[in-house]
Amino acid sequence: MWIVALALRRPYTFVVMALVLLILTPIVILRTPVDIFPDINIPVISIIWNYNGLPAQEMGQRIASVNERVLTTTVSDIEHIESTSLAGVAVVKVFFQPTANIQTAIAQTVELVKRRHGIGASKLANAVLRRIDRERDSLDIAVPADLTDALALEYSHPRWIVARWLARWGEADTRALLAANNGEAPLVARPYHVVREQLEAMLESAGVETSDAPLVSDSIVLAGGVTSLTELGAFKQGLFHLQDPASTLVTRYACVASGSTVADLCAAPGGKALELARVAGTVFAGDLSRGRMQRVRENVARVDAPNIIPFVADATAPALRDMDAVLVDVPCTGTGTFRRHPDARWRLKASDLAVLPAMQRAILRGAATAVRPGGLLIFSTCSLELEENDEQVQRFLAEHPDWTLEPPPVGVVPATVLDNGFLRVLPQHHATDGAFAARFRRPRLGAAA
């Protein structure tokens, strides 16, 4: 146990770390609001979790790239913030940004604590932060000998997840996946009502830097210069929506027929319904959550997609029938999207891999009743786990032996993301989010005869 070893070998260091954990962890985790800074989309604690295995210099660079305000905040900027929340920002500066003016950072934090909680609290904050500064070089942790423990520590992932991936993919692929999960997820725009070149010109004229997206040639990465996405003229005019290439590939893999009637039964927030609506005649976009369906309605209205019909419904018992195609992008563990949701890895439990597949099976069974004879059922997740992907396909086919797996036509999606007819997009191989999809064809009436 590294904690015991640290306590025996470096008692002073252990005491300081214990103080930090006892005093600052509740402050940072429980009292730091997500919207401390209005233009930061993840809390400070997520930055620490996501990058705690990196060298200090790289850590500082990544934090700075997320938002410079975290590292350059002054007293005048943040007097409205709960003062104890600033302890987390101060610790980030002390540990991970060696070029920052550490003494100023500490002094600012101490001053704010003094204003809010008095001289006694400020003295405690000053003592703890200055000791952390003095002894930060000695606050190291020995790398565990066990590979699973070492990777879990280095890349800040739960051990049980790392163990699963090592058993499935081996060390090299697992390292690549863990590193990809700790990268910054890009903003990727999908042109709507305009072609890529037109949207790219509009964005660049507004000062937005653009680059090519992987796997989907007409998507555009917003690489820099985006100060306020919702204020961009192209966004206000509904000329694009945001979608990772992995999600776009799911709808391309679905390959619905032109003019067909399609249902997206787990539609929120609506990106896949928008993509299906490019080809389909009508898209019924449903979701169980009324609040999440409001986002679908807002996106449909902004982009102006009149052939999308939003509705609230339970995908396990849909009222729709005789759809040409039905897509169910089912709730899942989301292990393919950890780079977009860095805190999700810590909320996930091993037991979720028993609970969620049961829900997915119920949705898949319900969705099958909405497909017309001869129609398509497309099952998809943003999970990397076999229990939520391949095993669900096997179970569905066992329960519906007259249905068949049907890959999309050749060339619809890149061959590199096809795996025995399935869509399988992997962050460590494709530089995108993760995704899985399978296409089922319902038999036509009288086909068995």
Image (cartoon, helix red, strand yellow):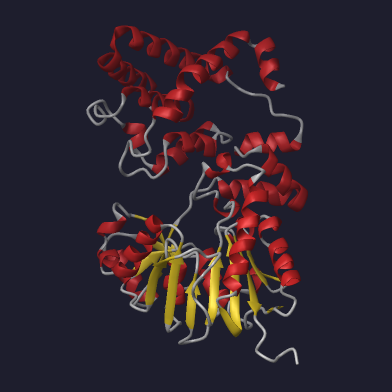
Identify which residue is drawn at 55% across, 59% down.
Answer: 432
Whole-percent x, y for residue 39 in the image: 32, 44
Q: Is residue 236 left or right of residue 136?
A: left
Residue 329, compared with residue 79, is above or below; it is: below
Placement of 318 over or under 51, stated as above or below: below
Q: Residue at x 54, y 64 (%)?
A: 246
Towards the viewer: 196 or 48: 48
Q: Position of residue 254 (x, y in %)?
A: 56, 76
> Going by the image, does 398 lie left or right of 48?
right
Residue 22 at x, y = what percent?
A: 50, 17
- Answer above or below: position of 267 versus 149: below
| Along the viewing direction, whichever of 386 and 44 lies nearer the viewer | 386
Q: Is residue 224 visible?
A: yes
Judged from this view, the residue extending furthest toward the left is: 76
The image quadrant of residue 142 is: top right
What residue is at 59 percent from the left and 43 percent from the top? 348
How many labels sit on residues?
Answer: 0
Q: Quadrant of the N terminus?
A: top right
The C terminus - image quarter = bottom right
Residue 41 lies, in percent from the top left, at: 39, 45
User: Residue 124 occupies which quadrant of the picture?
Assistant: top left
Using the rendered image of the protein, determine whether residue 176 is visible from the camera's viewpoint: no
In the image, residue 374 above or below residue 389: below
State which quadrant residue 123 falls in.
top left
Q: Is 438 left or right of 116, judged from the image as shown? A: right
